[in-house]
Image (cartoon, helix red, strand yellow):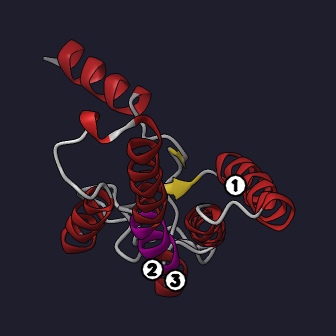
Amino acid sequence: MAAFNSTLSAGFNSTMPAGYNSTLSGGNGTNSTNSTLGVDKNSYYNGLVPSLGFNVAMLAIWSVILAVHVIQLYLKQYWFSIGFICTGILEVLGYIGRTWGHFNQDNLNGFLLNMVCLTICPVFTLGSLYYQLSKLIEIYGHKFALLHPSILYAYIFICCDVISL
């Protein structure tokens, strides 16, 4: 039984979600863990500490992607980039919240910034892709589409995305 428990705990530590350290902390410099569960009672991250390195790297990557889309919108006027710009802004805000959560796990504002922004940002990316799908159908012909006019694809899928939020 002891071998099973050590295997189980080793497997748990090795399957830590991306972007988290295995450190348990109270966020305010104290270690206020529950002695029976080993989970921080004040943490909104279930006792896990968001990884500073991972979140700063994702913040830098999304900042570059956001800058590329803003430049692309300015130079070439690709108007479908507006959805990608909204996604980039929300991703940057979400990873700012996660970085904030590294330093203070019991702060509700950083947690909500993280959760809300990173939850709704894919809707803008998919909305832009659905719009591009309808434009591709117009370019290559309606013989490939089941719905006419092709913009109905964008309307239907975007409505479903908004409802699913």
Q: Which dot, 1 or 3, sits closer to the camera?
A: 1
In the rendered structure, find residue 107 and report the number of the disc placed on it.
3
In the rendered structure, find residue 62 and report the number of the disc placed on it.
1
Query: Which of these two is toward me, 162 or 1?
Result: 162
Q: Residue at x 55, y 66 (%)?
A: 83
Q: Earlier in the sequence, mark 2 or mark 3?
A: 3
Q: Quick one: SS at disc 3?
A: loop
Q: Which dot, 2 or 1, sits closer to the camera?
A: 1
Most common SS among magenta residues: helix
In this view, which residue lies farthest toward the top?
3
| Amino acid type at mark 1 | Trp
| Amino acid type at mark 2 | Leu
Q: Residue at x 47, y 42 (%)?
A: 139
Left or right: 156, with 30 as reference point: left
Q: Earlier in the sequence, mark 1 or mark 3?
A: 1
Query: Which of these two is toward me, 120 or 6?
Result: 120
Q: Is residue 9 above or below residue 132?
A: above
Query: Which of these two is toward me, 144 or 165?
Result: 144
Q: Is residue 138 above or below residue 141?
A: below
Which residue bears the numbered disc 2?
A: 112
Q: Is residue 57 above or below residue 131?
A: above
Segment colored magenta = 113-120
Q: Earlier in the sequence, mark 2 or mark 1?
A: 1
